[in-house]
Amino acid sequence: MTATSTQELKNFINGEYVPARAERHFDVVDPATEEVYATSPVSGSEDVDAAYTAAAAAFEVWGDSTPSERQLALFRIADEMEKRADEFADLESRDTGKPRASLIDDEILVSVDQIRFFAGAARNLDGKAAAEYMKDHTSVIRREPIGVIGQVTPWNYPLNMAVWKFAPAVAAGNTTVLKPSDTTPSSTLLLAEIAAGFLPPGVLNVITGDKTTGARMIEHSIPQMVSITGSVRAGMEVARAAASDLKRVHLELGGKAPVIVFDDADIQRAVEGIAIAGYFNAGQDCTAATRVLVHESVHDEFVAEMVKYVRANVLTGDPHDEKTFYGPVNSETQLTRVSGMVDALPDRANIEIGGKRQGDRGYFYEPTVVTRLEQTDDIIQNEVFGPVVTVQSFREESDALAQANGVVYGLSSSVWTRDHGRAMRFAKHLDFGCVWINTHIPLVAEMPHGGFKHSGYGKDLSAYGFDDYTRIKHVMSYIGE
C-alpha cells in the first residue's frame, strides 16, 4: 500500500495540536482504495500523562461551571459542526469508506442533534426533594461531575461514538481524554479542534494510538471513570484493569441481535427493514439485524424475497457512487475476519447470495445471506461485524424465544408481528437492552442505548446516559434549635 503524499496527524491536548512525544506512528488507510493518506502517532505514556494532566487542570475550572454555561458551549459546538457538516462527511467517508452522499443526514446531523440534547440535559438535573427524612434534619441531594474521564471509541461510527462519549461527560461538568480508533482518527480530531473554540483548554483532549495507548489510559491514576465502546474482549480487559484502582467503568460492547419474524408479519416490509438494518454500514454495527429467526411456515418465502431485495437494492462499491448502499469494511483485518467466518461455515450451510470478497482493490465484501444453520454454529453465536445476514427457522414462540436469548450478548432485538399481545410478551422476555417492534435500528437521543450480559453495562444517549457521568452526594443539615 502506497500513497504519493501523506498527512501527519497530531494529538489535540490543552486546546491545541501538539506533536506526540512517542516516536512510533501508524498508517491511516482509505479502506476503499487501500492507499495510505495519513500517519498518526501511537501515543505513549508521556502523551497520555500530558493529556490527563491538562484534563485535571481544566476540571478545576469546568467542574465549577454552571449548567447554563455548559449548555451554551455545547450549543455553539453543535452549531459549528452543522456549518462544517461537509467537512466532517468528507473525513468520515475517507476514514471509513462510507457512502458520502448519505453521511450528512445519516450521521453528521444526527451527532449535532445529540450534542444539542445533552446541552439541554445539563440544565435538567434531578434528585429527591429536599425534606426532613429524620426529625430536625434536612436532607438534600447534590448531583456532581465525577472528574476526569478516559474514553475510547471504535471505528464503525467514529464521530457518533465520540459525541456519545464527550457530550454527556462535558455536559455534566467533567473533562475528558478521548482516544479514537487507530484506523479512523480524523473526524474526532476535527471535533476537538472545533470544541476548543468554545470550551476552556483541556476540557476535551484527543490522543491517537493503538490498544497499548488505550491500556495506558485505563491504567493511569488520574481518571475517575473510563468508558469504552468496543469488543467484549476489550471490555473485559478494561474492567479488569479499572478494578485495580476502583475506577468507574462504562462499557458498550458487542451484540448479536435476534430479529424474530412471525407468520403474520408483513413479509415485504420486514424484508426491506431487515435488509436496511442488516447491511447498513456494511453490517458493522452492534445492533445490526444480521441474525434473523423466521417462522417455518414463511421461512422459504422470506429467504426468497430477501435474496431478491438484496440483489436489486443492496449494492456495495465506490463510496462516491450515489447507487452505493454500503462501502468497504473497515480494514484488511476486518475483511479477513468476515471472510474467515463465512469460509468456516459448516457443510450443511447454504450461501443464498454473496459469500465472497468483491473486486481486488478495497476491502469490499458482497452482501451475503446464509441459511441452514444451527444455534450452536459459530456464526450464530459470535459477531461477524460484516454484511452477512443469517436466517434460521422456528416453530413455536418458545422455540423463537430460546433461540433469541441463546447467545452471550444482550444489546438489541426486534419482533415483527401484527399480534400486539405477542409483541408485548416478547418485549418482556427478550433479554436485550432494546426491543424494537416492526422496525429495527432507529435510535433517538431521548432514549437509552445499552445492553445486558456480555454487551456491557451503562447507557449511552438519554437522561440515563447523562446520569452515568454524574455522582450523587447526600448533604444533611441539623435544623433543630
Image: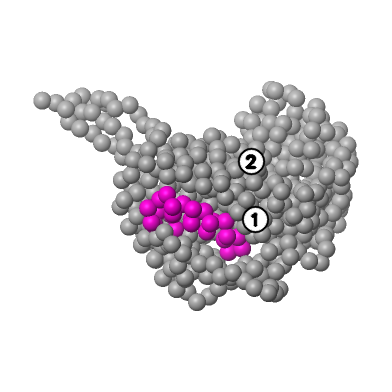
Which label sits in the foreground, 2 or 1? Answer: 1
| Quadrant of the drawing holding the N terminus | bottom right
Going 18% across and 25% down the picture, which residue do you hit? 136
The spot of residue 246 in percent (x, y) is 39, 54
Quote the CA–CA distance across marks 2 and 1: 30 Å
Q: Which mark is residue 314?
A: none
Q: Amino acid at mark 1?
A: Asp
Number of other residues with Cα within 10 Å of mark 1, as a class: few under 14, some 14 to 19, many 20 or more: some
Q: How many marks?
A: 2
Q: Amino acid at mark 2?
A: Ser
Going 42% across and 44% down the picture, which residue do you hit? 73
Going 57% across and 56% down the picture, which residue do you hit? 187
Pointer 2: what residue? 412
The spot of residue 223 in percent (x, y) is 39, 56
Q: Earlier in the sequence, mark 2 or mark 1?
A: 1
Q: Please, is residue 44 above or below residue 90 in the view?
A: below
Mark 2 vs 1: CB contact within 8 A: no
Is any part of residue 429 visible from this angle? yes
Q: Which mark is residue 90?
A: 1
| Magenta segment includes 203 | yes
Q: Is residue 365 left or right of residue 446?
A: right
| Quadrant of the drawing holding the C terminus | top left
Disc 2 secondary structure class: strand
The spot of residue 264 in percent (x, y) is 80, 27
Going 82% across and 60% down the picture, which residue do you hit? 358
The magenta segment: 181-205
The spot of residue 176 in percent (x, y) is 43, 54
Classify residue 182 by image quadrant: bottom right
Number of other residues with Cα within 10 Å of mark 2, as a class: few under 14, some 14 to 19, many 20 or more: many
